[in-house]
Image (cartoon, rainbow, N blue to C red):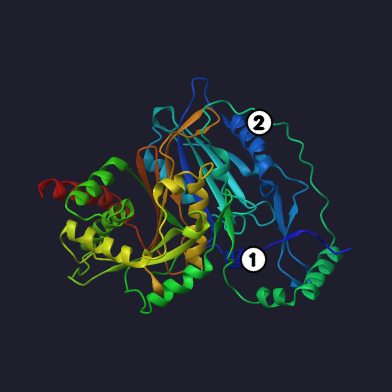
Amino acid sequence: MACVADRLSTADASFLYLDDVRTPMHVGSVMVFEPPAEGFDYERLVGLISRRIAFVPRYRQRIREIPGRLGNPVWVDDETFDITYHVRRSALPKPGTQEQLQEFIARIQPRPLDQERPLWEVYLVEGLQGGRFAIISKSHHALVDGINAVDIGHVIVDGNAVADEGLPDTWRPRPEPTDLELMSGALYEAVRSPGAVVDHVRTGVSDLRTVGGRLWSVASGVAGAVARTARPAPTLPLNAEVGSARRYEMVATDLADYRTVRTRLHRGNYHDVTINDVVLATLTGAFRTWLLQRGEAVHSGRTIRAMVPVSVYDEEHDGHVTGLTPCFVDLPVGEPTPAMRLHQVSFSMRQQVEGGHAVGAAALADLAGFAPATLHSLGARLSSAVSRRMYNVVVTNVPGPQSALYAGDARMVETYPVMPLGRGQALSIGLTSYDGGVYYGLNADRDAMPDVDVLAQGIVDSLAELLERRTRR
């Protein structure tokens, strides 16, 4: 009888094979919590995740290769699944500062996941200042496809501020298929669908992804955006040989500041400026400061090209989200005036999303659960499908809910993405707006960007400069 195990798509298998010690193919998140009155400990986290993953079976499955590689690998239940291997506990030494947390994240995030086990890990980090704790997650690209599995951060938190009792865990692993069953299943599929054999030897991106019932198509956007940006990205220190060590910086800003800048521009008849435009203009100013600090020439025409995944919707399908498309934005770091940088960024973004119906922040924030974690994962998958000669840095900006989320009854107060680095990409930037804040996670190669802290401070200073200049006008 043919094997009916769930087979990895060609895209998922390619992420698995591209995994190495220098560029591991997983995405992470950092969630900081205020503990409830009765406290929060490792046992509570283990219990919470055990109950929640009952609804996402992929988190108790591992990957099994087909003998002779006659087909893509398959997902099989892990008969020896041990949740305490995946949920780990650590603590910071006193005083538990942000710098200590950042160093901890930089050390654990680049470690490859064990491909002999389910492809995820979670760390409970205790001892933060003020009695807070952090939950740090890692999920492999091959696991987070948006159909069968969402990011583990999406699973852990929700909008209910109550202790999670959940349902009794009745999961029992299915017996693993034998080598003969795996081989016969692959051969059966090859006979039934000869095109699948061609797909197996060809790299690409899968074209259907679903989050909370919404369809995600990435392939069509890639081709169109690359066609619009034929010339390669400028040569910059951001494109360097990547090692296996990282630096990580967290930057917390106030969403109200971005709204203030945007509102004042609207009063000046610049009606098409978005919050995302203000974010990119803020990053442009930060990159300008970083280049100047390095002694780099910053002439009037100098730019940094960012690849920005943008969500789009289709009016013919009830306005539902239908795709992720890459926008290539040349950030005008050579422009000295903050307001002019913003206008140039806004014009560039508007040109690329016209006709594509970019999704507003409210539409994305309405997705069930903590969708930003999953959307960052899908954005990272998209960046891997585009030639890295086409951009200098990836910036994923995912709007999140503007109300509090909880792990059990512990309130999440901050959340930072950890986006992976690609080969030749010394920096990746992820940011999430959540409950009145905008939180940046800067993941950088440790040797190529020892001064990533300068860029982090530059974000704060650049936003302040935009606010100051808009006030004076």
Q: Which numbered disc flags the more N-terminal residue, 1 or 2?
A: 1
Q: CA distance from mark 1 to mark 2?
A: 33 Å
Rendered position, 335 above or below 410:
below
Rendered position, 232 above or below 101:
below
For residue 355, which quarter of the picture?
bottom left
Q: Give the x, y percent position of residue 166.
A: 66, 31
Q: Residue at x 31, y 42 (%)?
A: 255
Q: Amino acid at mark 2?
A: Gly
Q: Residue at x 58, y 66 (%)?
A: 207
Decide which of 219, 183 is in the foreground and name it.
219
**Secondary structure found at label 1:** helix
Q: Residue at x 38, y 75 (%)?
A: 228
| Relative horizontal placement of residue 435, taking residue 218 as reference (left or right) | left
Q: Give the x, y percent position of residue 70.
A: 76, 73
The outermost residue toward the right is 1
Q: Which residue is mark 1?
A: 13
Q: Which residue is mark 2?
A: 166
